Image (cartoon, rainbow, N blue to C red):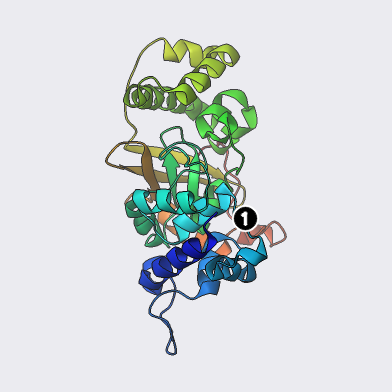
Amino acid sequence: MNLPELGAFLRSRRDRIRPGDVGLPQGPRRRVPGLRREEVAQLAGLSADYYTELERGSQKTGVQPSAQTLAALARALRLNSDERDHLFHLAERPIPPSAHGPASHVQPALLGLLDRLSNTPARVLTDLHETLVENDLAVALLGRSPTRRGPTASFVYRWFTDPETREIFPPEDHPHHSRWFVADLQAAAARRGHDAEMAKMVAILRRGSAEFAALWDTHDVAVKRTDRKRIVHPTLGVIELDCCNLLSEDGRQRLLWFTAPTGGRGAEQLELLSVIGTQDLASEPADCRPKPATDASR
C-alpha cells in the first residue's frame, strides 16, 4: 500500500473542494483553500484522527483503509470515476463495480444536486433501488435505508419479500407500485445485459414471490421518472407527494426527490416534517397533532 502517495492524493483532492460545494458554511477565518481535515472526516463518517493519519501517509501507523472507507472518502471528496479508481489503486484494494451495490460510487453530478436539495426529501439510488446516499428529510419521510449489502439492500427486493416494507404505502396502492417496480427493473435488466447481480436478484424473487414472477412474465417495461405517491408517516399521517426521478446518463443511478402537488396539503406537511425531523411527537397533546389517516401509503 502506497500510503505516502495516498495521503498526498487525498490532500490534493481536499484542497480543491470549497465548503459551499458540500453544503458547509465558508466561515470568516478559513486558512485553507478547500475543506479542513475534520470536515472531510465528518462527510465520510470517519474520526478526524483517523483521517489525519491517512493524509500523513506514514508507513509506521499501520493504517489500512477498507474498501468501504475508500468509497466513503470518494463520495466526500466528490471524486470522479477515474479519481475513485486511482484511490483504490493507491490503497491496493480491488476496484468495486462502478455502478452496482450499496458501496457504489455516487456519480458527482447527482451528489451535487442532492446537496442542494436541503429542503426536499431526496436520495440517490442504483438501478436496483439500493440507496447510496440520502438527506435528512428523506430519512424523516421514509425511514433510514439499510446499510447492508446483497439483494436485501434493494427496496424492490424487500417489497416482494418483506410485508413490513409495504406499510409505507396504503394497501390499495400496493398493486400500482408492484407493477411499476417490476417494469422499472425490466428496463434496468436490459440496460445491464448479461449481468450476474441482476440475474441473481431476479431468480431469487421469481422463486420467492409469485406476484413478482407473474408481473415479470408480462414483460412490461417502464422507466420510473415521475409518479404520485401517498406516504404513510407515523406522525403526520398520509402525505400525498409527487415523486420525481432524474437518471444518470447511463441509467444506472438516479436522483429521487419529492415535491408537494400544487394546492394540496402536502406542502404544509413537508414544511412541518422539516421542523420535526425524526422526532417522536407522540407525547404532544392530541389536538396539536394531525389526525390519524384512515388509509396508508409511501
Q: Can residue 136 be seen in this view?
A: yes
In the rendered structure, the answer to whether residue 75 lies left or right of residue 287 reads left
In the rendered structure, the answer to whether residue 212 lies left or right of residue 164 reads left
Q: Residue at x 38, y 23 (%)?
A: 189
From the image, which quarter does the N terminus lie in? bottom right
Q: Can residue 263 be seen in this view?
A: no
**In which image quadrant can residue 61 be found?**
bottom right
Residue in the foreground of this view, choosing between 105 and 216: 105
Residue at the right extreme of this rendering: 283
Residue position marked by numbered label 1 in the rendering: 64
Q: Please tell me whether residue 175 is drawn above or below residue 31 in the rendered image.
A: above
At which x and y percent is residue 157? 54, 27
Q: What element carries label 1?
A: loop
Name the residue type under label 1.
Gln
At which x and y percent is residue 45? 58, 60
**In which image quadrant can residue 278 be found?**
bottom right
Pointer 1: residues within 10 angstroms few (<14), some, or many (20+)?
some
Q: Which residue is drawn at 32% across and 36% down?
A: 251
Residue in the foreground of this view, choosing between 206 and 122: 206
Q: Please tell me whether residue 154 is drawn above or below residue 80 in the rendered image.
A: above
Residue in the foreground of this view, choosing between 158 and 61: 61
